[in-house]
Structures are given as structure tokens and as C-alpha cells.
């Protein structure tokens, strides 16, 4: 066990928080102690060593001693850990520890080491190894520092005393837990009496009232930080705080003088600047923005003023043209005021100022002035060359009233139709004018002063050519005129005739849009009977003199579509509606190509298929001959000829082998024979032969014919007979019968009775026309 052998005298002279025995203590119970407690390990506290030792000898730290050491040199002390052997060394016999180097607490504040006592005789440890700490004790060797300085900040001008401006903070590397080495206080070295600093917090505040930015804008304040609580011998550091006073609106605008003058020529352009005026404001930014105004109505009516944002000048511009002869001078009362006011400084008075600006109008030789801004004149077409169209007038606005001369501006690309008298300004024609060719003419007349031809002015002149009746009316024959087959007598045609001029139609009244209708004189028209009609039309106008023309209209009869307003031919309507897009045409073309390919493939397969010959007698098939003809009624005389059934000679020609290919083909085909399509002139027809006898004969021939294979043959003959006692109920034979019934009501029965209405309407009309013709011939 260890005993306290020696205390370092230096530590006894200084206070430390652990007490004198806190340098290092060794507690143990010796064998001679009354407690007789068992031996235990080392219990260590801290060693202390001063930093920044500069003496010639090594600094003594402390001593290690074991109670097992009898002083005979049999105990060896060993030191290990941080800095052992390099910074800290130990006397292996006495146990004294020394520091061989100067230590810096700010770099390393403590060292952890291990101590052990070894018996030299047995070379075995007398005690277990124990850990202890050597702490570097601080001294005031670091001055306070401002790591972020210098600083820049702002504060509004005219701020109250005590207004917080900025806070500075200094750092001290010394130990803040030991003494006053790191205790810092602040003070102002430079910057008084404008600013002060709190010694503890480092907050900088204003110390003077009414600091005016316009008087002084920038301040440089030096702040000092001193440790040891500011005592003598303490270390210090300083920094600079640059403070700028920001602007507030505490200054009104001021004109440097109260009266201004400017000269403006009367030729100044409207809307252009004619002068400038400026009021000074010591403030900056938005606090110096100024609005200028013209106070008197006379000046505000002729001039306007605006603020130039860059120069803050008042720019005066002209509202109306100046005229030296009418007014030679203007007086403008102008005010300037701030746009952004600070109510804190309203006690300073009104933030505005006034000045007077006198504008003198200068006389300028001006070009002539026309009496009107533009002229509109009229003249009749075909007027004689030299006819007066009108006149323009201009005068010299100057006081000398110089004579004016007139000219027409010529352009090489335009034909000359007018001329002007240079002195009087009268405009006359130089050519015959045609309203139908050019109804309006635009020319430009130029006026110059006789004394100064360089002064010119221009005015536009528009001449309207008035119409005279020099063109006869014409009918537009380009549009097709359609007459519907169902048109009634006295009904207007679906199309109208467009006339080029206001005219009167000889047969029908004129509509306001210069059109006339064609009235039908008969009930119905038939396109198959007559498709085109020519109608001579005479048309005249109401002009002076009266002009007329004759044209022939071509009317086309068509079967118009019912229920539609647009009356066009059905065929044409189909064509007009068949306009398809490119994609639709391509799709149709592809479909046609596919169908064509299918047909070609089908034909190819049919040709490649061979019909086998029937050789075997056991190959028995049914032979059914089908006549699939539908008669066309009583009027059909060609669909089936019964004479073919009554002619046995013609029937003989139908016999041929069906199981082998014929060696020759007759002039008529078997299908034609089967359907009875033979002409009566080509056969020997027995008109008196009965059909029943003919059928029996054919059955007998079929039974006795040994040249045909044993096919079952079914032949069907349809014969209506020779007549009926009741007679026919067909309407075909009643064409000659006349009826007094009125068939006009059939038109109102709808589309289903349209054909009947047309048939009976034609019959009535034909009979009526025949009656009228007979009466006319009788009267003749």
C-alpha cells in the first residue's frame, strides 16, 4: 500500500478546488494499523502542473511512494500512459515525477497515466497497476478575440437614444472555471459620444439624439474586450463596427429658385418635351421621390408635367399646338411634393414646394394650313374633260400671310385623272371617268408658300364617281335554271333569275334583291318528253335614258327531290354529294382491289377444276331443269315465249348428250332454249297444236329415247290458257276511257300515290290540251 510521503510545496501556496490533499492522495491500511483491514488497490486523485513553464529545470509534478519501499532500493517505480517518457519522467528509485516540456492547457488540458511498483529482487509487482491524471492548470495566457470582426450594421437616422444597433461577442481560450482568466468586459475605445456598449452583453446602442444622415452618414466604432474582469494586468482584444445611418423622409423638396424661364418655338410637336424643372431633396431612395403638378388651369390646359425617375426632374410636355400669332407667353405654377411621407416628422411642416415657370413662344415660319383635314368630292362618270370637281383652300398661318400654291402629288405607277389650278386650288378632270371601272379616286394635294417652297403641307382628297345610266341591265345566264317535273301551273320555279341592275321583269314582279321568278304556265313537265326549254326575256331599267336588253334563258327539266328546299337534279345531287376525302377514296380503292383479287382467284379455281365424264352406268343422278324466270306482267312479251312449247321441231333441237361435251355449239344456247328465248321467226310454229298433246308427245319421246343416260328428268311447263270469260281487270286496256273525276287531289296523298297522280294528271292535261286545241281550231 502507498502512504503520503511528500506534498509539493508549490501547490500548498495556491488555492485549488480539491484542497491541499487533492494534489494526490494515497489511502492504505498498513499491517500495523489498528483496523487490520486487508490490503487494497491504489486510489488516486489528480496531479496539477502549471502550463507555459519557462524555467531552465524540469517542473516538479509530484512523488510516488509505496509502503513496501523500505528505502533500501529494492523497489522500482514505472510510469506509463500519455506523455510518459517524453513529457513526464519518473525517478525509478525515488518515484519523483517531473515535466520536461512546457505545456499548453488550450491544446491539451489533462494527461492520463499509469503507475506501478516492482520488486527488484523478484521482478514482480508489489501493487497492481493504477491510473491517475495529471491536469494542466490554466494561467491567463490568452487575450479575448472577436472571430467574426470587423462588423457592418445600420441604424435609422434620427433614432432615439438607447436604440439597439448591434451586439458583439468576444471569446477567451482560457479556462472559464478557474479564476478570472476568461471573464470578459466590453468598452468603447472610439465612437463616443454617438454610441455606447453594454460591458457585460456587448450590445451597442445609440447615445446621441438627432443623428442626421444628411450631416454624417458613416460611423466607425471600436469596441474593446478585456479579461480578468477588466482588472489591471488583464489581456484585451478589439474589433471595429462600421455603422451607417439609413435614410428617413425628414427633408421636404426645395426648388433652388422661385422663378424659371424657357423658350419654346411654336413649331414644337405635341407630346414632345419642351423644358425641365427640378426640386432638390436631401433624402435618398423612395424618400426623395417627387411628384410635380401644374396648378393653374391655363398652364395645365396647354402643358403637362411628369417625373423622370432617374434624374427626378419635372419634364414639361406640350398638350396642344402653339401659335405665336395667338399667344406669345404662358405662365405655369408648378408644385413639387414627396410621395412617401413619414408621420413621425409631420411636425416639420408641409413636404412640398412651389415655383413659377414662364414659357415664351417663339415665332416660326410655318407651312400652309388647309381649311379641312380631308376633302370628299363628287363627279359624274363620263363627264367632259376639264369638268370642275371641287376646290381646296389653305392659308399661311404666319403674320406675313404669304401666298399659297397648290400641287397634286404624282405617282409613276398611277394614271393621271385630275389636275389642280396652282393658285385657286380648283380640281378638274383630265380624262373620262368610268364608275364601273373605278368608283373612287384618292389623290393627295400639296400646298407650299410662294416665298418659301420648302414649307409644305399635305391633305388627302377622295373623289367619288357618281353613276349615270350607261349600261343596260343584263341577266345572269351562268347559273342553271331548273324546272321540276312536279311544278304546278301558276307556281314559281325553284330558281330565281339574278339581274345585274335594278330592273322590271316583263312577266313577274321584281323583288328587292334584283331577282325575278319564272312562273309555269302548265301543270307538269316531263324530262323524257322535253328536257330543255328556251325562254326569251326582255329586261329594262328605270334610268334616264331607259336601257334594255334581251337574253335567252335555258330551263332544264329535272325530277326534283321531294321534301328539300334545294331543288337540284337527283343525278347531279348524287354527284355533288359524292365528294369524298382522300382517306375514303383510298379505302374504296382497297376494297375494289380486294374484290377484284377474289374474282380472279375464283375464276382461276373454276378453270383448274375439271368436270369428270360420266361413264359408269351405275352413276345415276337426278336431272332437274329449273326455269327461274319471273314474268313482267301483261306488258311483258319477251320474258317467255309459249310458242316454243307448241313447236315439236324446235324441241327436237334441244336433245343433246349431257354426259359428254358436245362437238359443236348451236347458234343458240341450251339455256336460251329452256327459257323460251327463240324468236318465232326461226321456228316452224304450229299455232293450232294443243299444249297437252305436245306434253304427251314429249313424254313418249323421252321414254323411247335410248341415247340418253337413265336420268330422272323433270320438265315443268306453265301455260296460262287462252283467256277467261270474265275478261281482264288490267288498267292497260282502259287508256281510251275518259273520266270526269278530279285527280288533282292525288298530289296530296303522299309519295305512295305520286306515280298514279302523274299518270292521271298527264291524261287530264292531254285531254284538256286537245280540247283547247280543238276549240282554237274551230274558232279559227
Image: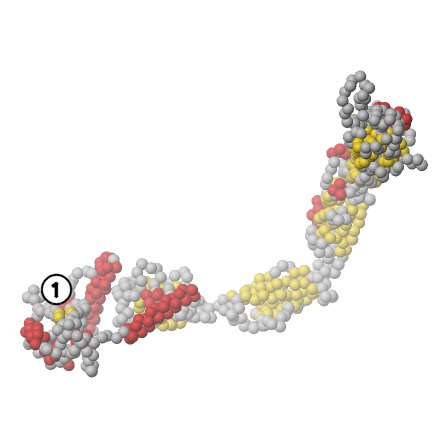
Name of the residue lying farthest toward the bottom? 664
Q: Quadrant of residue 40?
A: top right
At a point 79% along the width and 38% down the height, the residue shown is 154
Residue in the foreground of this view, choosing between 516 and 207: 207
| Residue at 74% over, 42% down | 286
Give x and y (percent) for residue 319.
69, 51
Is residue 107 visible in the rendered image? The answer is yes
Picture residue at 75% right of the left edge, 49% below the top? 310
x and y, in percent, of residue 160 in the image: 80, 31
Nearer to the camera, 777 or 444:
444
Residue at left offset 85%, top offset 24%? 4
Is 104 displayed left or right of 669 in the figure?
right
- Compared with 47, 101 (above or below) is below
Furthest residue in direction right, as rendered: 56
- Give the image location of residue 220, x and y in percent: 85, 39
- Hey, which residue is sitting farthest front in the picture? 121
Residue 720 falls in image quadrant = bottom left
Tell me where residue 178 sits by quadrant.
Answer: top right
Q: Nearer the viewer, residue 418 or 26?
A: 26
Q: Secondary structure at mark 1?
A: loop
Please rate how many residues cluster around mark 1, counting C-alpha atoms within 10 Å: few if below 14, some from 14 to 19, many from 20.
Answer: few
Q: Is residue 766 above or below residue 237?
A: below
User: Which of these two is toward me, 27 or 522?
Assistant: 27
Q: Quadrant of the N terminus?
A: top right
Determine which residue is flagged by label 1: 729
Residue pushed farthest top? 34
| Quadrant, the C terminus | bottom left
Amino acid at each position: 500500500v502507498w502512504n503520503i510521503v511528500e506534498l509539493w510545496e508549490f501547490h500548498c501556496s495556491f488555492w485549488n478546488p480539491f484542497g491541499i490533499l487533492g494534489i494526490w492522495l494515497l489511502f492504505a491500511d498498513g499491517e500495523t494499523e489498528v483496523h487490520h483491514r486487508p490490503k487494497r488497490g491504489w486510489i488516486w486523485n489528480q496531479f496539477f502542473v502549471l502550463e507555459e513553464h519557462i524555467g531552465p529545470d524540469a517542473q516538479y509534478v509530484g512523488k510516488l511512494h509505496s509502503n513496501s519501499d523500505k528505502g533500501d532500493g529494492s523497489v522500482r517505480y514505472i510510469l506509463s500512459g500519455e506523455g510518459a517518457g517524453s513529457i513526464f519522467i519518473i525517478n525509478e528509485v525515488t518515484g519523483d515525477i517531473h515535466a520536461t516540456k512546457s505545456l499548453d492547457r488550450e491544446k491539451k488540458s489533462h494527461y492520463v497515466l499509469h503507475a506501478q511498483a516492482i520488486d527488484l529482487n523478484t521482478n514482480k509487482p508489489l501493487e497492481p497497476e493504477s491510473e491517475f491524471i495529471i491536469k494542466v492548470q490554466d494561467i491567463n495566457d490568452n487575450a479575448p478575440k472577436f472571430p467574426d470582426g470587423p462588423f457592418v450594421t445600420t441604424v435609422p437616422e434620427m433614432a432615439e437614444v438607447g436604440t439597439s444597433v448591434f451586439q458583439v461577442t468576444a471569446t477567451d481560450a482560457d479556462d472559464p472555471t478557474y479564476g478570472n482568466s476568461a471573464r470578459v468586459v466590453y468598452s468603447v475605445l472610439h465612437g463616443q459620444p454617438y454610441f455606447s456598449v453594454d460591458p457585460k452583453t456587448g450590445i451597442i446602442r445609440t447615445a446621441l439624439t438627432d443623428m442626421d444622415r444628411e450631416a454624417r452618414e458613416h460611423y466607425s466604432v471600436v469596441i474593446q474586450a478585456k479579461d480578468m474582469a477588466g482588472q489591471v494586468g488583464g489581456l484585451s482584444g478589439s474589433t471595429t463596427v462600421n455603422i451607417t445611418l439609413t435614410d428617413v423622409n425628414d427633408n421636404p423638396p426645395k426648388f433652388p429658385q422661385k422663378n424659371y424661364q424657357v423658350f419654346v418655338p411654336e413649331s414644337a410637336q405635341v407630346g414632345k418635351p419642351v423644358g425641365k424643372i427640378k426640386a432638390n431633396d436631401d433624402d435618398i431612395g423612395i424618400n426623395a421621390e417627387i411628384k410635380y403638378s401644374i396648378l393653374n388651369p391655363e398652364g395645365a390646359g396647354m402643358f403637362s408635367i411628369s417625373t423622370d425617375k432617374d434624374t427626378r426632374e419635372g419634364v414639361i410636355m406640350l398638350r396642344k399646338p402653339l401659335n405665336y400669332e395667338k399667344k406669345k407667353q404662358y405662365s405655369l405654377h408648378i408644385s413639387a411634393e414627396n410621395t412617401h411621407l413619414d408621420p413621425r416628422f409631420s411636425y416639420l411642416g408641409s413636404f412640398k414646394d412651389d415655383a413659377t415657370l414662364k414659357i415664351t413662344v417663339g415665332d416660326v415660319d410655318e407651312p400652309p394650313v388647309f381649311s379641312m383635314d380631308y376633302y370628299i368630292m363628287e363627279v359624274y362618270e363620263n363627264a367632259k374633260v376639264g369638268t370642275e370637281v371641287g376646290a381646296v383652300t389653305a392659308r399661311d398661318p404666319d403674320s406675313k400671310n404669304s401666298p399659297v400654291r397648290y400641287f397634286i402629288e404624282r405617282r409613276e405607277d398611277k394614271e393621271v385623272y385630275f389636275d389642280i389650278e396652282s393658285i385657286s386650288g380648283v380640281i378638274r378632270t383630265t380624262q373620262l371617268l368610268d364608275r364601273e371601272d373605278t368608283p373612287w379616286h384618292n389623290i393627295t394635294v400639296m400646298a407650299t408658300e410662294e416665298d418659301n417652297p420648302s414649307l409644305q403641307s399635305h391633305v388627302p382628297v377622295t373623289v367619288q364617281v357618281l353613276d349615270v345610266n350607261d349600261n343596260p341591265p343584263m341577266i345572269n345566264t351562268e347559273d342553271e335554271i331548273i324546272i321540276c317535273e312536279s311544278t304546278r301551273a301558276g307556281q314559281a320555279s325553284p330558281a330565281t333569275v339574278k339581274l345585274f341592275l335594278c330592273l322590271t321583269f316583263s312577266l313577274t314582279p321584281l323583288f328587292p334583291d334584283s331577282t325575278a321568278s319564272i312562273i309555269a304556265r302548265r301543270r307538269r313537265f316531263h324530262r323524257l318528253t322535253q328536257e330543255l326549254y328556251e325562254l326569251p326575256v326582255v329586261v329594262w331599267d328605270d334610268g334616264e335614258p331607259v336601257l334594255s336588253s334581251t337574253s335567252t334563258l335555258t330551263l332544264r327539266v329535272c325530277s326534283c327531290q321531294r321534301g328539300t328546299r334545294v331543288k337540284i337534279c337527283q343525278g347531279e345531287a348524287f354527284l355533288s354529294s359524292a365528294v369524298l376525302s382522300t382517306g375514303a377514296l383510298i379505302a374504296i380503292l382497297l376494297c375494289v382491289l380486294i374484290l377484284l383479287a377474289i374474282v380472279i382467284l375464283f375464276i382461276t379455281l373454276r378453270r383448274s377444276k375439271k368436270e369428270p365424264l360420266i361413264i359408269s352406268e351405275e352413276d345415276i343422278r337426278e336431272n332437274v331443269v329449273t326455269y327461274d324466270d319471273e314474268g313482267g306482267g301483261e306488258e311483258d312479251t319477251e320474258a317467255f315465249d309459249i310458242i316454243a312449247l307448241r313447236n315439236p321441231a324446235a324441241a327436237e333441237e334441244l336433245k343433246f348428250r349431257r354426259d359428254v361435251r358436245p362437238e359443236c355449239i348451236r347458234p343458240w344456247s341450251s339455256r336460251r332454249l329452256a327459257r323460251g328465248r327463240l324468236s318465232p321467226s326461226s321456228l316452224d310454229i304450229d299455232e293450232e297444236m294443243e299444249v297437252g298433246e305436245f306434253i304427251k308427245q314429249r313424254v313418249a319421246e323421252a321414254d323411247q329415247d335410248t341415247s340418253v343416260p337413265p336420268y330422272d328428268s323433270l320438265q315443268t311447263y306453265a301455260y296460262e290458257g287462252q283467256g277467261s270469260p270474265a275478261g281482264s281487270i288490267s288498267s292497260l286496256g282502259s287508256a281510251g276511257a275518259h273520266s270526269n273525276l278530279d285527280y288533282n287531289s292525288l298530289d296530296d296523298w303522299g309519295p305512295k300515290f305520286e306515280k298514279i297522280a302523274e299518270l292521271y294528271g298527264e291524261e287530264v292535261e292531254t285531254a284538256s290540251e286537245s280540247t283547247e286545241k280543238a276549240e282554237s281550231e274551230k274558232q279559227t
